[in-house]
Amino acid sequence: MKPLISFPGIQDRGRRAFRMTPVQDDPVSLRVNGDLVDLEDLSANGVAFISEHELKSGRYDAQLNFTLDEQDFTIFCKVDLIRTHTGSYGGELQEMSSMDERLLSRFILECQKQAILRQRAE
C-alpha cells in the first residue's frame, strides 16, 4: 500500500499526477480532433495545450505520440475538455488501456529524469 502524503494548508486540486512541461528535447506531440496542438503540460491523467482551432467543452479524439527507449509509441485516446479559454485548453485523458497508462507514466518519468539532469548541468 502506498503511503498517503498530505501537506497542511494545501487543498487538493484534483490532479494527482506530476505535470511535466515539455521542452524541445522531449520527443512528444499531441493531436486533438486531428489537429496538431502546442502541448503546454502533460501528466498521466491530463493535458494542457494551445490550439489555433476553437474547441468547446466536450470529448475529443486525441493522439499522443512519444519516443521512449528509442522506440516510437502512439496512444489513441479521448481528451475530455474541462477548461476552455480562447486558444488555451485543459482536459483529462480518457479511454486509455492499462498498457497505454503504464507507457505514458514511464515516458513522464524519463522526462523528469532528463529535466533533473538539465538542471544539474546548469
Image (cartoon, rainbow, N blue to C red):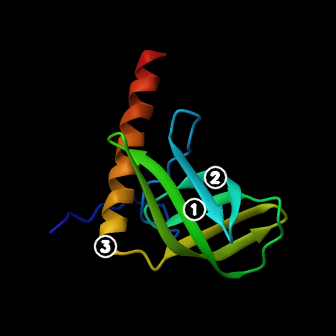
Q: Is residue 2 above or below residue 42?
A: below
The front one of 122 and 65 is: 65
Image coords of residue 84 (percent x, y): 75, 71
Q: Marks 2 and 1: in contact by CB < 8 Å?
A: yes
Residue 37 percent across, percent down from the top left:
70, 56
Tell me which amino acid carries mark 2. Answer: Leu
Earlier-in-chain disc, 3 versus 2? 2
Point out the tag, 1 or 3, that comes first from the N-terminus. Answer: 1
* Residue situated furthest top in the rendering: 122
User: Can you tell which of label 1 and label 3 is closer to the viewer?
Assistant: 3
Q: Residue at x 50, y 39 (%)?
A: 26
Q: Foreground residue, 14 or 100?
A: 100
Q: Which residue is mark 1?
A: 47
The residue tagged with tag 3: helix, strand or loop? helix
Residue 98 marker: 3
Residue 69, placed above or below residue 39: above
Secondary structure at numbered mark 1 = strand
Quadrant of the frame with the N terminus: bottom left
Q: Position of residue 4 (x, y in %)?
A: 26, 65
> How many angstroms separate mark 1 from mark 3 (CA)?
18 Å
Lateral position of residue 107 relative to residue 49, left or right: left
The mark that comes first in sequence, 1 or 2, is 2
The mark found on residue 17 in the picture is: none
* Residue under pointer 2: 39
Q: Identify the residue at the far left of this view.
A: 1
Identify residue type, mark 3.
Answer: Ser
Classify 10 Å Cα crowding around label 3: few (below 14), some (14-19), many (20 and above): few
Disc 1/disc 2 C-alpha distance (Å): 7 Å
Query: What amino acid type is highlighted by mark number 1?
Result: Val
Alpha-carbon span between mark 3 and mark 2: 23 Å
Q: Are marks 3 and 2 in contact (CB under 8 Å)?
A: no
Q: Residue at x 32, y 52 (%)?
A: 106
